[in-house]
Amino acid sequence: MPSLRLDGRTVVVTGAAQGQGAAEARMLTEAGARVIATDLAASIPAELESVIPSPDGVLVYRQLDVSDATGWAELAAWIRSQGWQVDGLVNNAGITRRSRLLDTSVADLQKVYEVNVAGSLLGIQSLAPLMGSGASIVNVGSVAGLTAHYPVAYTASKWALRGLSQVAAMELGPRGIRVNTVHPGFIETPMTQGAKPEFRQATVAETPLGRTGSVGEVAGVVLFLLSPLSSFVTGAEIPVDGGQASHGGAKSVSDALR
Ligand SMILES: NC(=O)c1ccc[n+]([C@@H]2O[C@H](COP(=O)([O-])OP(=O)(O)OC[C@H]3O[C@@H](n4cnc5c(N)ncnc54)[C@H](O)[C@@H]3O)[C@@H](O)[C@H]2O)c1
């Protein structure tokens, strides 16, 4: 019977030093995978040190700036030199810029696109040649890619990532490679620690489950999408947002009429 176990599978996670990426790297290792955790830091980040040794899978750390094509080529060459194929890729690395519509510069837009969109494109281009049938790619979008959202550069980049994901699902499907997207809502991570309290309060008010999410709640959906349990799921987009994006703004009306 298919299960959530990833024994014998090699999975690359980007932006794995903290937040959701670290939680994903930990959970995938516990599920039995060989996890290649990557991030900007030259040496293994503190968050990942405690994953090693794991009684289940194995975690190795490699430095990678996802916006650097040479870095991706070096990672792919290193994986090949180990004699491994790649069974999973989590394009998790992402950055935000919180400037508003009339203040956002082209430089802001370019920086966010370089990481959130080009970084994911480079990941797919670099590692798809090492993948066989049954491999799975998970792109990490955002509720900002499902609705309007106040940081315009970030919002536009996550909408663009959806387009990239759908093309990749179409193009790689015939090779048996699945491509899906998760859209986290407000998740408690270092990224959201820096957000204004008003952002948290207003988001919780728009969230039917009435709370923010945890990194483990995103990692669990990523694990499902990497596992054989989701073997006929591709081109899908799964919000992990407590229902935030589901009501199209009707929650405030519903709440007002209670
Ligand atoms: N936290 C949230 O509420 C939330 C909501 C929706 C979507 N997301 C998305 O989830 C993903 C993870 O977010 P998080 O909250 O864990 O963020 P985070 O800021 O806590 O962690 C992001 C990680 O990505 C790494 N990173 C940044 N630029 C990089 C680059 N060029 N190359 C490699 N690594 C890089 C950082 O070093 C960091 O370790 C992002 O794609 C983010 O856009 C987060």
Image: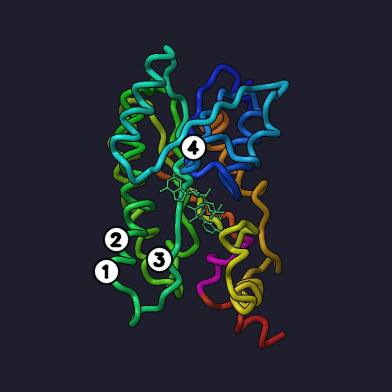
Q: Earlier in the sequence, mark 4 or mark 1?
A: 4
Tell whether position 140 is magenta.
no
Q: Are marks 4 and 2 in contact (CB under 8 Å)?
A: no
- Mark 3, residue position: 155
- Disc 1 and disc 3: Cα gap in Å? 14 Å
Residue at image point 31% right, 48% down: 118
- Disc 4 and disc 1: Cα gap in Å? 29 Å
Residue at image point 73% right, 21% down: 55
- Disc 2 and disc 3: Cα gap in Å? 13 Å
Q: Is residue 122 left or right of residue 94?
A: left
Q: Earlier in the sequence, mark 1 or mark 3?
A: 1
Q: Are marks 3 and 4 in contact (CB under 8 Å)?
A: no
Q: Are marks 2 and 1 in contact (CB under 8 Å)?
A: yes
Q: Residues within 10 Å of mark 2 (few under 14, many from 20)?
A: some
Q: Is residue 103 left or right of residue 257?
A: left
- Mark 4, residue position: 42
Q: Amino acid at mark 1?
A: Val
Report the magenta residues as a range: 242-248
